[in-house]
Structures are given as structure tokens and as C-alpha cells.
Image (cartoon, rainbow, N blue to C red):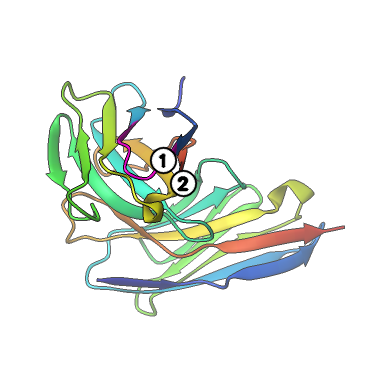
């Protein structure tokens, strides 16, 4: 099975940097995903890591350490529109369906 | 191009009624997933299709839940004799095999 942990809520200031952590325990690993979800909307893909290291995409970066079962999402130059829930999800290598197992999400509030 | 679409966006059902939720995946995507998202939680896997074949239905909570994708494109999730605990957002996602899953806006089901 899978167990994914991430903080429930975070608050950060507009223009600042915030790091959202995710730890996971899995019987098999085939990639970690980060999604953004605004209230009442679909989860939107942000990033994908399958190898250790940092993936950078504009204001968003994601880091993975497979040996530690750890990932983080880094958001730079925060904007008010970044207020949303951020979902960490793991794909299990043993699951032929490639299904994702999600954490409960981290609700980020960006304040002026 | 068009993303994943779902209908209806909102559905209110009386306890005991049957409901049918539709998903139109991104054109050409082989894989289709259904997830259930309770309030304040991350999405939870229900079932997976590869083309018209339902390869994994391990996440369906009871035999009242049934999904089909007869022509390998549009999918329908049917819930029979709805119960209050079925109230949730039902998300559909599609992908090309092991690639990133793209989500639709979801159907918010409320069972009274």
C-alpha cells in the first residue's frame, strides 16, 4: 500500500518563496506528481519526478529523493492566484493501472 | 485542444436513486481513470480503463458502483441506489498509457 503525508495548511506572503513537503511510503515507486487544485476546479498538473533531483519549470520547482521517500514543491515569487490546494501523488510501479495515490493536499493561502 | 470534460457538473439525487456520470476524455488517450474526492481530501482511485477494457476496478467501494467505456472513448460511471456516503466529487482523468493524467472538472454529487 501507499502512505503519503503532506501538511494540511500553509500561509505565505505575496512575493515570497514557499516549500511544500511530501513524504511517502510505497511498496513500489514509478514517479511522483504534483497537482494544483483551486476550489471547485480540476486538479492541474504541475510537475513530475521519477529520478532524484530537482526539476524546474518557471516559478515552480519540484525535488525528489527516492531513498528518503521525500519530495518538495517550491513556489517562488508567490502571487495571490497561487492560493490553492497542492496535491502530492505517487504512482506505484506494481500497479498495472498506473493509478495515482494522492495525499490529502496542502491548502496554501497567499496573503498580501 | 479540448481537455477532459464531464457532465453533469452538479447532480443532486435522493437517497436510493440511480445516477450516471459521463466523462469525455482527451481525444486519442488510451487510459481513463475515475477518482472520488471527498471534501478536504485528495482524490481516491476507483477504476481504470485501457481502451474499452476495464483492467482495474479495485477501488470501487461497493457493487453499487459500475463503470463502462464500451467504445474506448466516452466513459460512464453509474451508481445504483445512492447513499449519503456517496456524496463527493467524481473526477475523471485520461492519459496516454503511463504519461501524465489530465483531469476533468468533476461532477459534484450530493445525495439527500
Work out whether mark 1 precedes mark 2 in sequence or the reverse, and give the earlier one.
Answer: 1
Instruction: Please identify the quarter of the rendering in which residue A51 is found.
Output: bottom left
Residue A32: percent from left, percent from top? 39, 59
Q: Residues in magenta?
A: B13-20
The crowding category of the residue bearing disc 1, from other C-alpha atoms within 10 Å (few below 14, some 14 to 19, many at least 20), is: some
Residue A62: percent from left, percent from top? 52, 60
Instruction: Please identify the quarter of the rendering in which residue B104 is found.
Output: top left
Residue B98: percent from left, percent from top? 26, 44
Q: Residue at x 28, y 59 (%)?
A: A30
**Chain identifier of the residue bearing label 2 in the image:** B
Q: Is residue A3 above or below residue B5?
A: below
Q: Residue at x 17, y 36 (%)?
A: B50
| Residue closer to the observer: B90 or B92 | B90
Q: Which mark is residue B112?
A: 2
Q: Secondary structure at mark 2?
A: loop
Identify the residue under disc 1.
B14
| Residue closer to the observer: A90 or B33 | B33
CA gap, disc 1 and disc 2: 5 Å
Q: Is residue B6 above or below residue A109?
A: above
- Residue A94 in the figure: left or right of residue A48: left
| Tags 1 and 2 touching, CB below 8 Å | yes
Say if the magenta span includes residue B43: no
* Quadrant placement of the N terminus of chain A: bottom left
Q: Residue at x 70, y 57 (%)?
A: A76
Amino acid at each position: 500500500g501507499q502512505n503519503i503525508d503532506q501538511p494540511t495548511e500553509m500561509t505565505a506572503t505575496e512575493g515570497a518563496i514557499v516549500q511544500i513537503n511530501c513524504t511517502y511510503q510505497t511498496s513500489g515507486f514509478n514517479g511522483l506528481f504534483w497537482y494544483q487544485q483551486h476550489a471547485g476546479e480540476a486538479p492541474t498538473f504541475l510537475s513530475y519526478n521519477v529520478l532524484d533531483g530537482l526539476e524546474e519549470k518557471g516559478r515552480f520547482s519540484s525535488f525528489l529523493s527516492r531513498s528518503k521517500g521525500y519530495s518538495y514543491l517550491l513556489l517562488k515569487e508567490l502571487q495571490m492566484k497561487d492560493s490553492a490546494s497542492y496535491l502530492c501523488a505517487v504512482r506505484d510501479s506494481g500497479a498495472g493501472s498506473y493509478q495515482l495515490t494522492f495525499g490529502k493536499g496542502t491548502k496554501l493561502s497567499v496573503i498580501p | 485542444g479540448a481537455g477532459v470534460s464531464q457532465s453533469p457538473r452538479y447532480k443532486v439525487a435522493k437517497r436510493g436513486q440511480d445516477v450516471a456520470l459521463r466523462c469525455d476524455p482527451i481525444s486519442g488517450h488510451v487510459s481513463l481513470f475515475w477518482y472520488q474526492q471527498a471534501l478536504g481530501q485528495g482524490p481516491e482511485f476507483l477504476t481504470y480503463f485501457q481502451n474499452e477494457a476495464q483492467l482495474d476496478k479495485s477501488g470501487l467501494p461497493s457493487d453499487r458502483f459500475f463503470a463502462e467505456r464500451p467504445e474506448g472513448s466516452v466513459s460512464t460511471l453509474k451508481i445504483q441506489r445512492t447513499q449519503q456516503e456517496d456524496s463527493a466529487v467524481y473526477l475523471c482523468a485520461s492519459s496516454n498509457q503511463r504519461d501524465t493524467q489530465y483531469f476533468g472538472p468533476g461532477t459534484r454529487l450530493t445525495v439527500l
